[in-house]
Image (cartoon, rainbow, N blue to C red):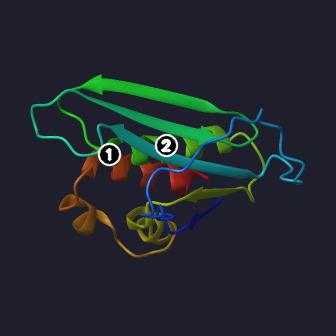
Amino acid sequence: MALQGRKRATAAKDGPKKRSCFPLQLSQLPHNDRTWASDGSMIPAASALGDAKSVIAALTGPKTIVLSMDSRNLCILQGELMGQILGLILSSTGPKDASLYSDLLNSVCPIEDSRSSIGQEAKLRNMNGHSYYCWISDLAREI
């Protein structure tokens, strides 16, 4: 599976725009059970350490799953990394040439390096989300 990074789009600063509601339609693109995308979010986006937060990890592709975590001890990184973990687990049962798209570019290189002979242990030891990154590296090596 290839993990591919995408830069996060920035919102226009022209003020609020009028939103229209349209029913979501299934994609007509031929993904052939090979294309996945993950993302994480946190509400409120900016909060202090002791504030209540809700972190959401989402994965979409041939299947869709959304995981919500509510606590005071959460950060957006947990949502982003859990989305990637979900993607690696669910895509492991499908074709080996599947792609997982993510906007968390900090994890693209460690995942690609985990499949090579480059040792990641020393680098991962000092990163926030160390346990999540180790789990992701193990899953990436298995796929």
Q: Which labelled disc corresponds to residue 47? A: none
Where residue 100 sits in the image (x, y, percent)? Answer: 62, 55
Q: Residue at x 51, y 64 (%)?
A: 9
Which residue in the protein does label 1 denote? 76
Quadrant assignment, res 50: top left
Q: Is residue 67 left or right of residue 29?
A: left
Please tell me whether mark 2 sits on a helix, a strand or a loop: helix
- Check disc 2 and give the amino acid type: Gly
Dividing the image into 4 quarters, which one contains the N terminus? bottom right
Which residue in the protein does label 2 denote? 83
* Proximity of marks 1 and 2: CB atoms separated by less than 8 Å: no
Q: Residue at x 47, y 66 (%)?
A: 108
Q: Image height check: is 68 above or below 92? A: above
Q: CA distance from mark 1 to mark 2?
A: 11 Å
Mark 2 burial class by Cα count in 10 Å: few <14, some 14-19, many 20+: many
Q: Image height check: is 73 above or below 118? A: above
- Looking at this view, is 11 or 14 the one in front? 14
Where residue 60 sits in the image (x, y, percent)? Answer: 65, 41
